[in-house]
Amino acid sequence: MRKDQQNISDLDENMKICEPDENGLLWHNPAEKPFRLCGFYWHDQDQVFRRLPMSPKYPISENVEALCNHTAGGQIRFRSDSKRISLKVEILNIGRMDHMPDTGMSGFDLYIGKPGSERFYSVLRQSTHTGSYITEMMNVHDSVMRDFVLNFPLYNGVKSLKIGLEADAKTEEPVAFSVPRPVVIYGTSITQGGCASRPGMAFSNILSRKLNVEFLNQGYSGNGKCETEMAKILSEISDPALFIIDCDANCSDYKLFAKLLPRFIDTLRTKHPQMPILIISRISFGKEAHHCTIDVKPLFPSRALLKNAQIQIAEVERRRCAGDHNIHFLDGSTLLGRDYWECTVDGVHPTDLGFYRIAENLQSIVESLIGVQA
């Protein structure tokens, strides 16, 4: 064939006519319309499922470099009348943890329903058996238009992903978010979603459903430590509706934390002088129930952790006295409730019950700070 007769589809894969597979499914790129890919702010730039840019302008640690490839908080939203939904997935790592289910670490889960009233439908259960697979997430008899949310794995990466829908199905853009700007939450393994049984039970995903708001999950297991470089990178996110700082549990050196927290906030304020900021101290840990009576507020088990709470309270009060009324503090020890010792896997990381309580107790304050009524 002469060059002037060459078919454009041979040069550009996006121009190829998609043909259904032997099962009658068409495979779609979730980054293309009408699908809405959420939780990956730099995806348009780098074309990867990653929570930080591929080439950050400021240095990050090796651990954060690895963890930012975990897809916690990632979502795909769309509407379709397809009776079947399948996924074609290639994950980054094949592994497991001894205190977190594979379904939460490496699986996807599917929710169906209008924003604010989505209900769980299914979860991918073969995630660590092999690095790539095809799995069916839904197969029903009636062809009606439905609203779908697919949540990405919390503690694994995704190299590639395709969504299989029936070839004759209609697919539409999802309902708009209640607020067009995202909520950014930066913090710890608990922020990232450890140890939820499936992705939809991470508290950022629960809040995303309840409020119909995009959350950019910037939880870094053991490594969200208020580094100034991370504040500079995250400040690149344009016009967040709210920035939540949840780093307390990762900052055991309270003297260093006392230096890093003000710098982190100063860096955010350079780019976002009016953005609401919510600082949350850490949740109560199980062993703390043995340091006090049931009728007394939990005592921090170490001087360092008590100091962290004092540091955060003092920093917020100082800034509010100086005129910054868009910064707030929340006592995280209240988030799990009075029987907090029943809400974790290992005394630290929440179960689904724990995550649900965190989301319930955060909901009203997040609503007020972003101006949404659920």
Image (spheres, grey):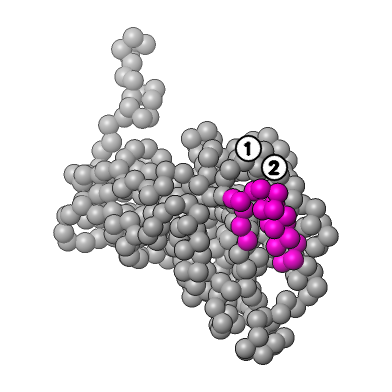
| Element carrying mark 2 | helix
Q: Picture coordinates of residue 312 (x, y %)?
A: 71, 61
Classify 114 as above or below 101: above
Residue 186 shows in the view: no
Q: Which residue is painted at 78% across and 75% down in the image?
A: 302
Q: Picture coordinates of residue 338 (x, y %)?
A: 56, 82
Amino acid at circle 2: Thr
Q: Residues within 10 Å of mark 1 (few under 14, many from 20)?
A: some
Front residue of 226 and 345: 226
Residue 139 shows in the view: yes
Span highlighted in magenta in the image? 309-329
Classified by dominant secondary structure, the portion drawn in magenta counts as helix
Front residue of 242 and 230: 242
Q: Picture coordinates of residue 12 (x, y %)?
A: 38, 25
Please give the residue where the numbered disc 1 appears in the rendered image: 271
Please give the residue where the numbered disc 2 appears in the rendered image: 267
Front residue of 194 and 128: 194
Q: Is residue 185 left or right of residue 200?
A: right
| Element carrying mark 1 | helix
Front residue of 225 and 45: 225
Q: Are marks 1 and 2 in contact (CB under 8 Å)?
A: yes
| Extreme residue in the right direction | 255
Cα distance between the residues tagged 1 and 2:
7 Å
Q: Which residue is painted at 34% across and 38% down in the image?
A: 33
Q: Is residue 90 magenta?
A: no
